[in-house]
Amino acid sequence: DQQVKQNSPSLSVQEGRISILNCDYTNSMFDYFLWYKKYPAEGPTFLISISSIKDKNEDGRFTVFLNKSAKHLSLHIVPSQPGDSAVYFCAVANSGNTPLVFGKGTRLSVIA
Amino acid sequence: DTEVTQTPKHLVMGMTNKKSLKCEQHMGHRAMYWYKQKAKKPPELMFVYSYEKLSINESVPSRFSPECPNSSLLNLHLHALQPEDSALYLCASKSNRGWTEAFFGQGTRLTVV
C-alpha cells in the first residue's frame, strides 16, 4: 500500500503559466516533506522542503503548500519555464532524519 | 564538493556473474543509502548505513550485499541476480542536519540478462 501518492503521472503546462503538482500521504506521523526534481540519466536533486510546523514555504518561483488535516501537499511553480520539464518526486520523512519514502513521480512538460 | 559519485553508470551482467556498484562522497556525511528504482515506480529504500554500520536492511534478498569500508565509500555487491533485479540503483548521502543537506548520485542502470 502506497504511503505517498502522486496521482497525476504527467502534467503539461504552457510556458509562463503556473504548474501545480500534488501529493497525498497516508501516515500522520510524517512531519517532513520534500520535493525532488529528476532529469533523465541523473539522480534526484533536492528542490524545496517544508516541515509540519509550517503550511507554506517559498523559494523563488517554487512554493510548497502543506495541508496537514488533508494530508496533502502541493508544489507550485510560477512562472513555469521549459527548463522545469522533468519528473518531480514528492518525498516524506519522520523528523527529517528517517529514510525518505517517495511518491511515484509526476512528469512535468513545460511547452514553449 | 557536493557530489555523490556512482560507478559504473551502466552495467549489464549475467545471472551467474558477480559485480559491485560503488558510491563515493567526500562531504563528511555519515549516513549513506541505497535505493532501487524500477521503471515508472518510486525509488525504494534498500539499505541504510550510519557511521559505517548497517542500520536498516529493508528485507533485501541476500544476493545483494552492501558494504561500507570507510566513511566515504559505499559498495553494493551483486551475485546471482535475476532479470527482475534490473533497475536504477541510487546512492544518497545525508548530513546530520537532515534531508535538505542530502545528495543523490546519478545512479547505476543495471540490466541482468
Image (cartoon, coloured by chain):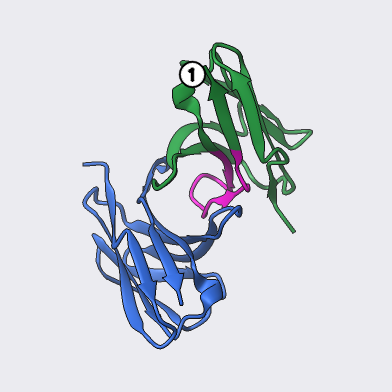
Chain colours: A green, B blue
Q: Which residues are magenta?
A: A88-106
State the image coordinates of residue B21 (x, y, percent, origin top left).
32, 68
Residue that extends furthest to the bottom in the rendered view of this protein = B16
Looking at the rendered structure, the kind of residue marked 1 is Gln
B25 vs B97, left or right, is: left
Say left or right for A52 vs B107. Answer: right
Residue A65: tell me if it is visible: no
Looking at the rendered structure, the secondary structure element under dot 1 is loop
Is residue A87 shown left or right of residue B51?
right
- What residue sits 49% from the left and 16% below the top? A61
Within the image, what quadrant is residue B59 found in? bottom right
Residue A76: image location, x then y, percent:
60, 22
Residue most toward the right?
A70
The number of numbered badges drawn on the structure is 1
Q: Tell me what residue is drawn at x 63 percent, y 48 percent.
A: A104
The residue labelled by disc 1 is: A81
**Does the magenta segment cover residue A20?**
no
Number of other residues with Cα within 10 Å of mark 1, as a class: few under 14, some 14 to 19, many 20 or more:
many
From the image, which quarter does the N terminus of chain A lie in?
A: bottom right
Q: Looking at this view, is B28 or B93 the one in front? A: B93
In the image: residue A1, left or right of residue A58: right
Above or below, comparing residue B73 to residue A108 in the picture: below
Subunit ID for the residue under disc 1: A
